[in-house]
Amino acid sequence: MSAETHHGHAADHAHGHDHDDPHGGAAHGSRKGYWIGFLLSVLLTAPAFALVMSGVIADPRLTAGIVMALAMVQIVVHMIYFLHMNTKSEAGWTMLALIFTAIIVFIVISGSLWVMYHMNLNMMPQMQAEMSSAGM
């Protein structure tokens, strides 16, 4: 490969246009894509912040659920617009790894919550009395 061909190839990848790498890499981001990702991030963060700070919803569980839903959407926005994850990058292996990670995280979090709930539910009565008298 000559120096001109190699230099031209490197120059093509340095300008940041949104196209797929022929070697199986992820697409490069464009300035427009980054701005869209930034604006979506702000539009997802501001309502969550406002909900928590204003206290318009009296039930904290509902507020937490809404904030978590907005956070999950924001994770997807970050993965698409900033990390450039899609089904084409790395021949789909990054998406498969992401799905596997999400499943493991779901199992760990739901299992932990299940164990904590049942530990509290099945606590021995004398332990509950001791904890309430100790001010816990």
Image: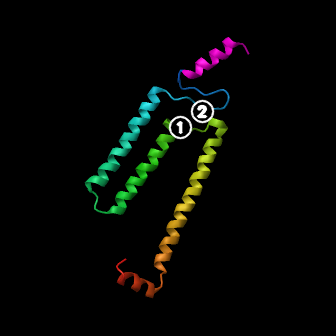
Q: Nearer the viewer, residue 8 or 40?
A: 8
Magenta residues (range): 1-14
Q: Where is residue 124 in the image (x, y as percent from the top left)?
A: 48, 85
In which quadrant of the rendered view does residue 20 lie? top right
Q: Position of residue 35 (x, y in %)?
A: 42, 31
Query: How many discs mark residues in the rendered view?
Result: 2
Q: Residue 26 got which mark? A: 2
- Proximity of marks 1 and 2: CB atoms separated by less than 8 Å: yes
**Among the two numbered marks 1 and 2 on one chain, the one whose residue lies closer to the N terminus:** 2
Q: Residue at 40% x, 40% y: name it.
A: 41
In the rendered image of this protein, does residue 59 appear above or below residue 42? below
Q: Which of 57 and 128 is in front in this view?
A: 128
Q: Position of residue 113 (x, y in %)?
A: 49, 67
Q: What residue type is labelled 1?
A: Leu
What residue occupies the far front of the structure in this picture? Answer: 134
What residue occupies the far bottom of the structure in this picture? Answer: 126
Q: Residue 83 got which mark? A: 1
